């Protein structure tokens, strides 16, 4: 998504990459607690203002934090997963 943003606005990748925190999926990321999703936990802790995530993770986090909003990316920035 950052690379797509850079094609729209040169320099966006560097700015976004500098600000981004890898809160999940990395070797130093905290494990998910047994009773909830890691996304819901981190959002409840206010570890970040926004969380870029797939729809399934966002829906799970919203179940745990009903006031959380889910906002889709515009088509020009949207990415998918190839499995």
Image: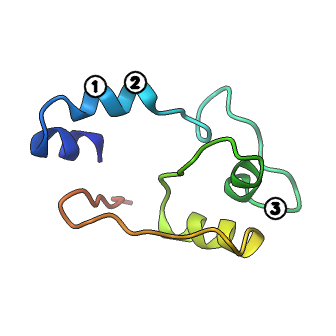
Return the residue at label 3: 36
Return the residue at label 1: 14
The residue under the point 11% across, 42% down is: 7
Q: Is residue 4 left or right of residue 45?
A: left
Q: Is residue 42 above or below residue 82?
A: above
Q: Of the residues under marks 3 and 2, which one precedes in the sequence?
A: 2
Q: Of the residues tagged 3 and 2, which is closer to the observer?
A: 2
Q: Of the residues tagged 3 and 1, which is closer to the observer?
A: 1
Q: In this view, does 47 lie above or below 41?
A: above
Picture coordinates of residue 71, whole percent (x, y):
44, 68
Q: Is mark 1 on a helix, strand or loop?
A: helix
Picture coordinates of residue 57, whole percent (x, y):
59, 64
Picture coordinates of residue 28, whole percent (x, y):
68, 26
Nearest to the observer: residue 19 or residue 29: 19
Residues tagged 3 and 1 counted as in contact (Cβ below 8 A): no
The residue under the point 61% across, 41% down is: 24
Residues tagged 1 and 2 counted as in contact (Cβ below 8 A): yes
Q: In this view, does 3 lie to the left or right of 44?
A: left
Return the residue at label 2: 18
Using the numbered discs, state the Cα–Cα distance from disc 1 to disc 2 in whole angstroms.
Answer: 6 Å
Which of the 4 image quadrants contains residue 48? top right
Disc 1: CA contacts within 10 A as few (<14), some (14-19) or many (>=20): few
The residue under the point 74% across, 59% down is: 37
Q: What element carries label 2?
A: helix
Using the numbered discs, state the Cα–Cα distance from disc 3 to disc 1 in whole angstroms.
Answer: 33 Å
The residue under the point 33% across, 59% down is: 82
Disc 3: CA contacts within 10 A as few (<14), some (14-19) or many (>=20): few
């Amino acid at each position: 998504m950052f690379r797509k943003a850079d094609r729209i606005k040169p320099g966006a990748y560097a700015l976004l990459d500098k600000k981004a925190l890898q809160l999940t999926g990395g070797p130093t990321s905290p494990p998910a607690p047994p009773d909830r999703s890691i996304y819901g936990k981190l959002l409840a802790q206010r570890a970040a203002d926004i969380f870029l995530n797939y729809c399934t993770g966002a829906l799970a986090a919203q179940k745990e934090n009903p006031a959380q909003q889910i906002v889709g990316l515009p088509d020009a920035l949207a990415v998918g997963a190839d499995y």
